[in-house]
Image: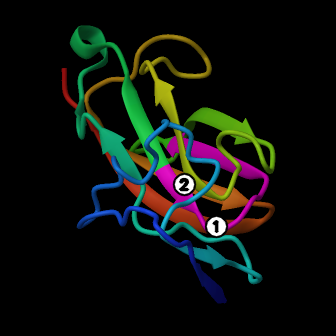
Amino acid sequence: MVSVLTANAPEAKDNDFSDAFPDGNPNYWYGNVAVETGPVRIIGDILCYPSVFKPLSEGETRIAYNLSKDANISVYIYDASGQVILTKKFASGVVGGRAGYNDFTWNGIMDIGGYVGNGIYIIQITSGNSLVATGKLVVFD
């Protein structure tokens, strides 16, 4: 890994990256920049907001993650029985598959139609045949 320090750039404070992208465009980083040469990985955790998702009353949730480098990414959401209820695919270098911050919104509707029920859902992020990260999402409406 190679670290590069950008001069006169604001530093993010304690996991608050709101100042890191002053124009709202996370295609570049201020502060410390890491260039990854190994396999793609998630930096930090998969985050969901709101963390308890209420699809019927709140409408949608945002699922966010930070990638170490550009990669083709697949995101799967599984129910408690292990059934895939949502599949999202993102190409390398575009939103969802680019290095740095990525997010997408989900309205709680399954790929086969209809809203998900209350429960805990597992989020898996893969690249190629490799599992990159897992997270969870709680639905309670």
Q: Position of residue 46 (x, y in %)?
A: 42, 55
Q: Looking at the image, how many numbered discs can be counted on the residues?
A: 2
**Residue at left 54%, top 54%?**
124
Residue displayed at 31% across by 17% down: 55
Picture layout, residue 77 above or below residue 14: above
Q: Residue at x 61, y 45 (%)?
A: 75
- Looking at the image, residue 80 lies above or below residue 68: above
Query: Which of the image's four quarters has the C terminus?
Result: top left
The amino acid at mark 2 is Gln
Q: State the image coordinates of residue 116 (x, y, percent, origin top left).
A: 39, 22
**What stretch of residues is rendered in magenta?**
65-77
Does dot 2 land on a helix, a strand or a loop?
strand
Residue type at mark 1: give it. Answer: Leu
**Which residue does the numbered mark 2 point to in the structure image?**
124
Disc 1: CA contacts within 10 A as few (<14), some (14-19) or many (>=20): few
> Magenta stretch: residue 59 in it?
no
- Callout 1: helix, strand or loop? strand
- Few, some or many residues within 10 Å of mark 2 (<14, 14–19, 20+): some
Which residue is at a point 48% across and 17% down the rendered structure image?
109
Is residue 61 positioned above or below 26 on the image?
A: above
The reply, left or right, for residue 98 in relation to residue 45 is right
| Of callouts 2 and 1, the N-terminal one | 2
The CA distance from mark 2 to mark 1 is 7 Å
Q: Kindly identify which numbered label has been placed on residue 29.
A: none
In the image: residue 56, left or right of residue 100: left
- To which residue does mark 1 refer? 131
Instruction: Tell me if I can see residue 120 in this picture.
Output: no
**Where does the N terminus fall, quadrant-wise?**
bottom right
The one nearer the camera, 57 or 140, is 57
